[in-house]
Image: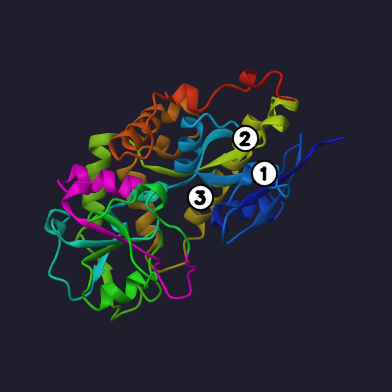
Amino acid sequence: MKPVIRLALRDWDFITPLLLGDLASDRFELKIERLAALPDDFGSDPRFDASEISFSRYTAGRARGEAGVFGIPNFIMRGFRHRCVVAAADSKLTSFKELRGKRIGIAGWQDSGNTWTRAAMAEAGLGIEDAFWAVSRLAADHPVTDRVGRYAQPGLIEALPGQPPLLDLLAAGEIAAVLMPFMPQGFFAKGSRFRALLPDVRAAERDYFAKVGFVPGMHIIGIKPELAAREPWLPQALSDLLDESQRVWLEKRRRYADTTPWLIDELVRSGHDLPESWNESGLAANRGMIAAFIEQLRIQNLADTDLTPEALFPAVSALEGAN
């Protein structure tokens, strides 16, 4: 009898072939639950056998010696971050360096995406110590939670009292920019209150890729260690199935490129600007990016660790005796 794997994911377009039943494994049955918010603590969540999880939180947990999740180096969420620095539409600022000495809003200090964004800003000449970081929720309908934790530093990284919405502060000119995980509501409309800080984010991201050689990864797939120990073939099989879903989805998008009138242009430009291997899964394909992220955790004081990519993503054989 095939094992049933309950997988938690965000509602990514590229899992459509799996949801529609166009793809399936002959070794396991996959049941996907699409979530707006991922499990807070997947390791102890009885609802799921596998889940999309934060790369940053997984890495920090491993640095602390935690072993409640077995990570698979399949970067289910990956993307450049230069476009994620948003300014008010009428702002005169057009570069990361111009944010020196100014107030920058951020909704989660440890988040993987924000870690990569700060790395991109530092590469362009704006270090953490060069600005004031105002930590709060992005919008009024977002919950009030601890968004900075032990990383707060008075006068440098501070949670705003009452957590006023950062987008409201940005529109009012009280902060200079906000680091966004996704674009704010109304961003794509003509006359939006907000714009990307950089006037040509694509050029900046293309230059960044030329320097570092990778597209940053934010989320990976985690699996319960006891399941991986019991079914040692499963982590790779699950990763391969997700990769195949992405391949099939992209092939269809290139054929049926009618989502927007110019989507086909974007698909062509991405195909020209990036190597076919840019989204490959696995440790070998991502070792450089993983090592760079571990180094950023050290540089940004998110974790004091001597982790290596191999220690972060050990082979299934390392779980012997876990079952």
- Tell which of 88 and 244 is nearer to you: 88
**Residue found at the far front of this picture:** 154
Question: Where is mark 3, residue-wise?
Answer: 250
Residue 45 colored in magenta in the image: no
- Between the residue at mark 3 and the residue at mark 1, the CA separation in whole angstroms equals 34 Å
| Residue 68's disc number | 2
Q: Helix or strand or loop: what does disc 3 sit on?
A: helix
The three-letter code of the residue at mark 3 reads Leu
Q: Which residues are magenta?
A: 115-144
Residue 282 place in picture, x, y as percent: 50, 30
Q: Are marks 1 and 2 in contact (CB under 8 Å)?
A: yes
The 10 Å Cα crowd at callout 1, few under 14, some 14 to 19, many 20 or more, is few
Question: Where is mark 1, residue-wise?
Answer: 44
The three-letter code of the residue at mark 2 reads Gly
Query: In the displayed structure, would residue 47 be above or below residue 323?
Result: below
**Residue found at the far right of this picture:** 1
- Tell which of 261 and 152 is nearer to you: 152
Quarter of the image containing the N terminus?
A: top right
Mark positioned earlier in the residue sequence (1 or 2):
1
